Every structure is written in structure tokens, then in C-alpha cells.
Amino acid sequence: MLFNSYEFIFVFLPVTLAGFFLLGLRSRNLALGWIVVASLAFYAWWRPVNVLIIAPSILVNFVLARWLLRLTAHKDRAGLARLVLLLGIVFNIVFLGYFKYVNFLATAANDLVGTNFVLTQVILPLGISFITFQKIAFLIDVHGGRISSFTLRDYGLFVLFFPQLIAGPIVHYREMMPQFQQARCRWDSENIAVGLALFVFGLFKKVVLADGISEHVTPIYEMATAGSEITLFPAWIAAIGFTLQIYFDFSGYSDMALGLARFFGVRLPANFDSPLKATNIIDFWLRWHITLTRFLTAYLYNPLVLCLTRRRMAKKLPGLGGRAPSVGAFFQLLVGPTLLTMFVSGLWHGAGYLFIMWGLLHGVYLSVNHAWRLFGPKNWANKETYDRFMRPTGLVLTFLSVAVAMVLFRSTNVGAAKELLQGLVGLNGISLPQQLYAQLGPLTGLLQSFVSASTDMSAQELVLAMAWIGVLLLIALLLPNTLQLTARYEPALGVYSKPAASRYLLRALNWTPTAPWAVAMSVGVVAVVMRLGGKSEFLYWQF
Amino acid sequence: MTDQDLLIVFTRTLRDLLGDDSIVLAMNTRRSDVDGWNSLMYVTFIVAIELELKIKFRVADVDSFETVGDIVAKARSLLA
């Protein structure tokens, strides 16, 4: 069931909320149990067999976690506890691997060593990548002593809570359960108003903005898939347009998730913080899919770097940093772990060569960014001079790097990605729609050696696509984001009341439950409802 | 070692690591308060402290420290 579908908005959500508030009048336990039942129904709606796949894995994890909990209480059982943790992690990775990667591994084996494995149709349970990461994090947290007690209902609630079940944010038990345990489970006007605002902002971003630009972007990727040459302008429209599409799609989904959880009095962690305003790629990853970065950093990157740094420094070799940074340390402690982490990130997103290449490319970007920080010139007069020049330069460079990498993320096969990447650097030539080319006048003679007329894209299509890109860029770069607009109501965990902007006009945009905002949101809802009904999935639901 | 002694060791280590002699750590200092003290330098800092004090933090602890005071408290308990 999509968040942006009639059945979700007009049937599932009202029924679930009504049941929650009614049962909440009797007891919190009943109300929380109701959320688990509703979440299972939500999950089953898409394909009921999904529940039969995911439920046993939840039970296995629950049993392992209980065992781990008992073992961690005894210091002399630490070895067995580590073994159980390892068993749990392996179980979850194999579970994910079977459903998500078995076909990719067969294809890779056939490609690499000429085997002839026959591919079978494996049903990919919705949101399996997100659910698996949460289950692994839970086991590690139990082993690390961060979780001291839990019941099956609590665990089910943590894994299945429908606002974040399919596409995150990826949450920790310790940040969710205290909220559920203290939830009033009663109607709360402020929670409903803030939740509704977040939900409507997200719905508008998804249905109007992301779906709007996708109409101009998708045909170009389809042309590339069909093997057509993509020239300079359409290639850049595809790269930049898809970057904006996925930003508004996924951040829209995340806003809706925040809003839905808030209806139940629960705050989820923030997943986006205006990533396109980032002035370097390190900053980008601290603002884009924040909870995935947080997971990979805490459970993969940090332990790996910690282990490598300990080994290196025990041998009296320099670590990172210091007054004269070491190139050896840079490669061993930074480039290696960064590439591995981003490889895992790419593979987590999808079973395919292009996702892996996308992840590795970001690994390279991050390494270059770190190298610049460690070894780059430091002869700027002061920080202000550096910022004045480097911040705008960094913003443009970061955006273009992200957009180029998005071509790998979006393309359906390597051939299509190659066509688009060639187009981006002009290797497929530069063409203008016939109508525009005819109006070049005296410039025609000057430009005809490298610009041609094309019928692939009409002048109207080109101008419309560029207008969409311009408007969405202005929104992404100049306006405060949803969390800033609603900051005074703590829309997400850890996002406290901060003014959205110091300038009066932007400060006036801060959301409050007032008549002008009600009118503005109603207009947004009308725009959304006019576009609802089409089958428009969230891009991240495939993961 | 008192908390103040540990703070002195931590400050000296971080100054060497970031090449900045103006750094002064307090119990409530957070990483975001110190320019350049990113996640990479944080891990190197932790290992440098481990080597200096001959202690070993758990991975889960390293991830959970929010302030310098948290690291001081854990180091003190490991030294006890």
C-alpha cells in the first residue's frame, strides 16, 4: 500500500488511527498491539506472502536476541555471546542475500567464469534491506549492552512500525522504545497538526514535484535503454533531473514517515537535511539518507577503522592526522575503509553492477574530499577568504558529482549508463530541437560544425524540462527544508526549535497551525489529489 | 589519575593530532565544538588515548560518547 494511494490515505490511516485512539482509552498495551496488527496488515496488503517470509525471520531474530540478552548478563559467557551475535548477523545477511542477491550472484558467475546457472524468480519482500539492517543493529545493540529488556510485542513494534517499515528511516530500538513506552495513545491536537503538516509537505514533494519532473526525465532514460544516442542537453537534463526527482521523492517519503509516526506521538530520526545545499561530498553524506550513513558508520566503518588504527599505531606507525599527515595511513585507514563502506552501500541499494559502481564512485569522491582536507593547500589568508571562494565552488562541484553518479544509479543497464555518460561530456554531440535550431539565424554557420538539429526532443519539451529543473533547484537550494519549517515543534528526533532563517521573509515561512498555512496546505492537497490515482511508487520502495 | 589529569592528556593528544595548540577541552566539549575534529580524527584520537593510558574501549562505547566528559568517565572506570 503506497502512502500516496487513496486506500492508504482514506481507509487504512483513518481506521488505524481510530483503533489506536479508541484502544488507547482502555490501555497503552492494547493500543501498541493494535499498531503491530495494523503494520502487519499494511505489509501484507502488497503481497500477503510477504508476511509469511518476514514473520519467521523476525521470530528467529527475537529468539537469538533473547539468548544474547541472557548471555551478556554473564561475563564468563562472552565467547558464546560473540558466537550467537555472529550467527545472527550471518543469518540476516544470508536471508537478505537469498532474496535480493541470488540472481545477481548467478549472473555475475555466468559473466565472470562462464557458468550457466539458470535464474529463478525470487520474490523480493518489500523493504527487506531496511528491515534487515534494523534487525542486525538490534542484535549488535543487545550484545553491546545497550538494550536490557524487550518483549515480542516490543520487538515486533520496533521492526514493523508501518511509517518506517518499507523505506526507513532506519531506527534504533533505544530511540524508539522509550517513546512507545511513554506514549499517551490519546488524541493530541498538536501531534495531529504537526503530523498532518509533515505528511502534506511530503505528499506534495512526492506527487507534485518528484512525479512532475519524472515525466521529463524517464523518457530520456528509456531512450538510452533502447540504445539511442543521448546528446549533451538531454544527458544533463537526465542527470540533474533525476537527482532532483530522487531528492524530492525520497525526502518526501521521509517527511511522510515523520508525519505518520507523529500521529502516534512518536518522533523518528531525520533522514534529510537539504543535502543539495552541501558544499562538499562529506557534508552531502551527512545530509542525505542520514540514518543509512549513521548505520554504516556505526556498524561497519568505525569498527573497521578502529581495528586498523589500533593495529597500525601498535606498530608505532602514524595514524591519521598529526602535524604531518601520512600517505600510508591515508590509504590504509581512510581510502580502504571508505571504498569498502560505499561498496556495501551500493550493494545494499540494489543487486547490480551499476549500484556497485555508484557506491564505489562515491567512495572515490569521499576519498578525494578527505585528501583535499589532509593534503590540500593551506595557504589561504583566513577562513573567511577560503569560505568565500570554496563554498560556492564546492556546492557546484558537489552537486555535479552527485548528478553524474546518479546516472549510474538510475540507468537500467550498463549500455544505457554509457550512452548517458558519453552524452554528459559531449561525446554524442550537441543537438538542438529543430524549431530552436532554425531560429539560430546568423549563428547557424558558426555553430553548425558541432551543433546539429534533432527531432528527438521538441523545443517545448526542452524548455519545459529546463523550467522544471530551474524551479526545483530554487526550492532545494533557497527555501528552508521541512524540518526547518516545523522546527519549533521538534518534527524529528534531535531537531529542536531553531529559527528557520534569520531573514524576515524566510522566518515568516515557519509553519504554525494558523489559517494562512491551512489555506496554503489545502491548496497543496488539492494539487496532490488532482494528481493522485496513478501508480507512482516511491523510488526507495524497491530496496 | 583525576578527571583534570585526563583532560590535560586528552587536550595534549588532540592538539598534536589536529596541529592546533589553541584547543582547550572541557568536560562538556563536543566534537562539533572543535574545528577539524571529524569522525576520522575521532577514531585516531581514541586509539591514541588507548595507547597513552594502556586501556581499550569497546566499539559500542566509542560510538556512544557524546562529550569529552563521557570519554573521561569511561577512561577513569577502565583505569580503576
Image (cartoon, grey):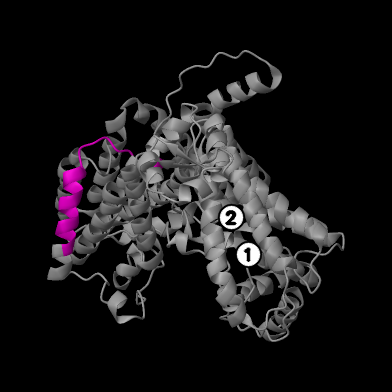
Q: What's the residue at 34%, 49% (across, down)? A: A463
Q: Are marks 1 and 2 in contact (CB under 8 Å)?
A: yes
Around disc 1, counting alpha carbons within 10 Å, would you say few (fewer than 14), some (14 to 19), or many (20 or more)? few
Q: What's the residue at 53%, 27% (across, down)? A: A98
The Cα atoms of the two marked residues, 1 and 2, are separated by 9 Å
Q: Are marks 1 and 2 on the same chain?
A: no
Residue under pointer 2: A297
Name the secondary structure under disc 1: helix
> Which chain does tag 1 point to?
B
Q: Is residue A254 visible?
A: no
Q: Which residues are magenta?
A: A520-543
Q: Is residue A158 left or right of residue B35?
A: left
Magenta span has A340? no
Q: Amino acid at mark 2?
A: Thr
Residue nearest the observer in this picture, A478 or A176: A478
Count of marks overlaid on the render: 2
Point out residue A117 in the picture as x, y percentages from the top left corner: 60, 14
The C terminus of chain A lies in which quarter of the figure? top left
Point out residue A347 in the picture as x, y percentages from the top left corner: 56, 38
Residue nearest the observer in this picture, A520 or A390: A390
Q: Amino acid at mark 1?
A: Ser
Numbered badge on residue A438: none
Image quadrant where residue A378 sits? bottom right
Q: What's the residue at 20%, 46% (across, down)? A: A13
Point out residue A165 in the picture as x, y percentages from the top left corner: 37, 44
Residue under pointer 1: B39
